[in-house]
Image (cartoon, rainbow, N blue to C red):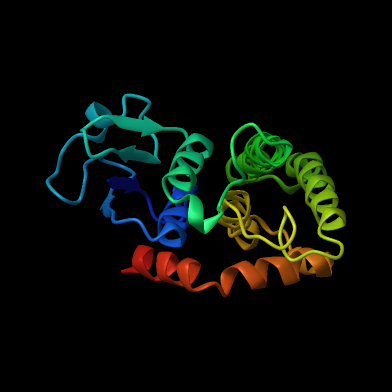
Amino acid sequence: MKLYYVPGVCSLSPHIALRESGLKFELDKVDRNTKKTASNGADYNLINPKGYVPALQLDDGSVLTEGLVIVQYIADLAPKKQLAPKYGTMERYRLNEWLAYIATEIHKGYGPLFRIKNAEEKGPFVENLERRLGYIATQLEGKPYLMGEQFTVADGYLFAVMTWSPRVGIDIAKWPLLKAYFDRVAARPAVLAALAAEKS
């Protein structure tokens, strides 16, 4: 498998999932501006016509896109790692609930904060995102991860997007449970390895 990624964006989520899974994979960095791949200068738009990362090229040459789908695929390839509950269980639907919330309310919530420069215009978007982060903080009461004791792909996804907080002026320290959670995920060996690989 090969993961196409851009450092510092949401492709960090499947990168973490791959490292947590123990599966064999390659990385191929995509130049954000030229859309060329680092490995051979290929046009990334021909690999993923949607034009954005992540994309996971499978061993048969087919390509899977959309982060929350990719991470579940990875989890299902390595069931012993318990990165996702089994299909058909209520726990799996709860995982999907978290992944959807992170994608639509948190991930997309950061977007306007990168685009809007005027602090007054940015205010409502900051308030909206902070309400949602505050909600997550309440859900972490008494448990180390979103689903309880077990780290899942939802945690990797949430961590990936929360790394953007300093870049948009949001201090997660105002929610001690959320800050402790972020630090806990950041300390995982697979997460450290993914971050180090994307910096190299």
Q: Position of residue 45 (x, y in %)?
A: 27, 29
Q: Position of residue 3 (x, y in %)?
A: 32, 47
**145 vs 72: above or below:** below
Question: Which residue is depicted at the point 62% across and 42% down?
Answer: 107
View extreme (top): residue: 49
Image side of residue 108 versus residue 53, left or right: right
Q: How many marks?
A: 0
Q: Position of residue 193 (x, y in %)?
A: 41, 70
Q: Nearest the camera: 10 or 100?
A: 100
Image side of residue 143 versus residue 197, left or right: right
Q: Position of residue 4 (x, y in %)?
A: 31, 45
Q: Nearest the camera: 187 or 131?
A: 187
Question: Which residue is depicted at the point 41% across and 45% down?
Answer: 77
Q: Nearest the camera: 189 or 31?
A: 189
**60 vs 40: above or below:** above
Say if residue 30 shows up in the picture. no
Say if residue 146 shows up in the picture. yes
Question: Which residue is depicted at the point 75% across and 58% down?
Answer: 148
Image side of residue 22 versus residue 167, left or right: left
Q: Nearest the camera: 23 or 13?
A: 23
Question: Which residue is depicted at the point 53% across and 38% down?
Answer: 68
**Quadrant including the C terminus:** bottom left
The quadrant where residue 97 appears = top right
